[in-house]
Amino acid sequence: MLDIADLSVSYGAIRAVRGISFTLRAGELVSLLGANGAGKSSTIKCIAGALKASGGSITLEGKAITSASPEQVVRAGLATVPETRDVFPDLTVAENLMLGAYIHRRDPAGNRENLEKLNALFPRLAERSSQPAGTLSGGEQQMLVIARALMSRPRILLLDEPSLGLAPSIVERIFEMIETLKKSGLTILLVEQNVNQALAVADRAFVMRLGAIVASGTAEEIRSTSDLSAHYLGG
Ligand SMILES: Nc1ncnc2c1ncn2[C@@H]1O[C@H](COP(=O)(O)OP(=O)(O)OP(=O)(O)O)[C@@H](O)[C@H]1O
């Protein structure tokens, strides 16, 4: 469904991603693991069209999106939740959500239907729909940016560190939500430092180190790689 082939990303002389290749199959949840600075966010940003690849290709359902703009990537069916967790603080929760439906702005009926589904999935957001997004807790803001990404009706969702800086009980809720989304058939690429929880929900995983993929396999295989934390994750 999503094919990454020999992808490289550079910031000037810094080679953040060094020729990585991997595939996401329809309906799969794949975790991208690795210590700080391994190149996970750069990979996500490049797939999302926010960073230019310096080499390699990105293909979504047979269509090359390597040089696509962020809007073209969303239109192709891939939505991203960046780790920055940006909400528009002065806009209401409902207004934030509608911004996620920008590419479907000529389909208000479809957006209403999708919003109803998301309200059922995220009841706390539904309760707070007329509140400014800036008044939400960190966990609620994370839910909001996920829901906003889903307003574009993607087939693939990229999640960059959704648990970052959240209390353990909230992290648990976020992971439950991710499992629910997977069960609904969504294909998910999950970047996480929270290795155990990421492996618990993943079908497969890749470990990045210094811009390269150094381990890959089923979640079970990666979990049983005994030197994983010491060598690859900096633990
Ligand atoms: N805007 C930038 N300018 C220059 N170098 C950058 C920039 N962003 C990232 N880098 C460098 O690229 C490398 C990969 O960073 P990246 O953020 O992709 O890693 P990461 O695995 O996502 O880590 P983190 O979890 O800290 O975000 C690091 O060496 C980082 O210092």
Image (cartoon, grey):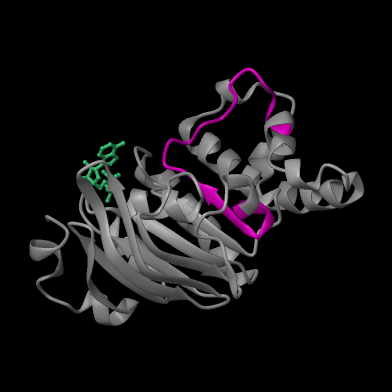
- Name the quarter showing ligand 1: top left
Q: From the viewer's perspective, is residue 205 above or below residue 136?
A: below
Magenta-drawn segment: 73-94
Q: Residue at x 70, y 50 (%)?
A: 152
Residue 179 position, x and y percent, is 52, 65
Is 55 inside the magenta-drawn segment?
no
Q: Residue at x 25, y 41 (%)?
A: 12
Label total for image: 0
Residue 95 position, x and y percent, is 73, 29
Q: From the viewer's perspective, is residue 224 above or below residue 120?
A: below
Q: Quadrant of the N terminus?
A: bottom right
Is 83 inside the magenta-drawn segment?
yes
Q: Is residue 122 shown left or right of residue 17?
A: right
Residue 123 position, x and y percent, is 68, 44
Q: Residue at x 47, y 70 (%)?
A: 29
Name the quadrant containing residue 13: top left
Q: Residue at x 44, y 75 (%)?
A: 23
Residue 228 position, x and y percent, is 15, 69
